[in-house]
Image (cartoon, helix red, strand yellow):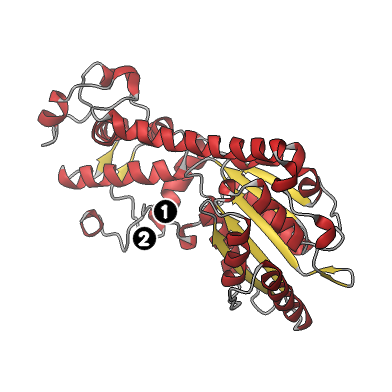
Amino acid sequence: MFEDFYGLTGKPFQLSPDPEFYFGSKGHKSAFSYLKYGVYQGEGFLVITGDIGTGKTTLVRALLNELDTRAVVAAQIVSTQLDADDLLRSVATAFGVNVGIDGKARLIATIEAFLLMTFQSGKRALLIVDEAQNLGARALEELRMLSNFQCGDHALLQSFLIGQPELRILMRSPLMEQFRQRVIASYHLGPLDQADTRAYVEHRLSLVGWKDNPQFEADAFVEIHRATGGVPRRINSLCNRVLLAAYLGEKHALGRADIAAAAFEMANEMGADLAVPPALTNGQSAMPGTKRDAAASKREPPIGGRVGARPLAGITERIEHLEHNVDGLLNIVRGIVEPERALPDEETRGPARSSKGR
């Protein structure tokens, strides 16, 4: 809709991760440098964490686009509450290894044979686990055991773990000491600052042929950062709504009031976690002169600037976030209460080889 109106060649703020839109903010450049360092090291674990919507998956896909497939065989899995055995099968499937139902020992041997064959062909195997905060202690230990596979002095498998902050909580468990020794580097990806928020918006617009139409006033970028907290996914959602509203109002210049009004609407309609200016919490409209004013001014304003007319959506999102936290803590507690069940017997799987941690 608004793409044609503003002469854009595509959707600048789509929500699905797209490496073509990768933006190197200060934080993302640092995280990307850590990923490239990990690839260079060729062993151990590298851990990248960040809150929901900070761009972790886009970062990983940008890395995959840069990898030399002649030297690295990369596989990616998304953890969805996998137990240890299911994780092993997922690893095999991600690398294209056919696995039967002959039991765990045969499965491990099959994975090792594939990794050895990959190494002998002059390549290295890289496993990327997204949403790794959903893994339990036993699943992480299985990954550590896979890192024991070697040919001479060369590790056959390297793993990158990408997840939300709950992953850091799990890794601090006393049971994870041996795992922590294999972590060569870790980085926490935070939100964008105000300057990077503006650069991020302009970067995405420029990739679809934006010619300063619509024009964003300086205070519009300040409001985008304030409303979204600098979280890229929230920025995308808000800017999509802003451009749609501008199209409906046939506007070619956008200021702070336009951004604030869109944030207000999203908070009311979906319980979106966006900060609403104090003026709007008192019922004042921020978009005078458009067809949307009458409806917006009649809406009951959110209390305290963040709760919308449909608070259940926001509550549901927070409950899901809390469930992630509880799952991580339960895994730690189970490992402490039943350590003999939490970790497999390492002696049956070969000696460990520790990498230098940070």
325 w.r.t. 346: above or below? above
* Snapshot quadrant of residue 37: bottom right
The label number, if any, that marks residue 204 in the structure image: 1
The structure residue drawn at horizontal position 12% and vertical position 31%, both measured from the top left corner, is: 295
Q: Secondary structure at mark 2?
A: loop
Type of amino acid under label 2: Val
Badge 1 crowding class, 10 Å Cα cut-off, few under 14, some 14 to 19, many 20 or more, is many
Residue 194: where, in percent of width, then height? 49, 35
Q: Secondary structure at mark 1?
A: helix
The structure residue drawn at horizontal position 79% and vertical position 43%, both measured from the top left corner, is: 177
* Snapshot quadrant of residue 97: bottom right
Question: The N terminus is located in which quarter?
Answer: bottom left
Q: Which residue is mark 2?
A: 208
Query: Residue placed farthest to the bottom in the image?
Result: 121
Residue 214: where, in percent of width, then height? 28, 47
284 w.r.t. 254: above or below? above
168 w.r.t. 346: above or below? above
**Between 164 and 231, the one nearer to me in the picture:** 164
Question: Is 164 on the left-hand or right-hand side of 145?
Answer: left
Q: Is residue 126 visible?
A: yes
**Between 250 and 172, the one nearer to me in the picture:** 172
The Cα atoms of the two marked residues, 1 and 2, are separated by 7 Å
Residue 326: where, in percent of width, then height? 54, 35
Q: Contact, CB < 8 Å: mark 1 with mark 2?
A: yes
* Snapshot quadrant of residue 307: top left
Residue 121: where, in percent of width, then height? 75, 83
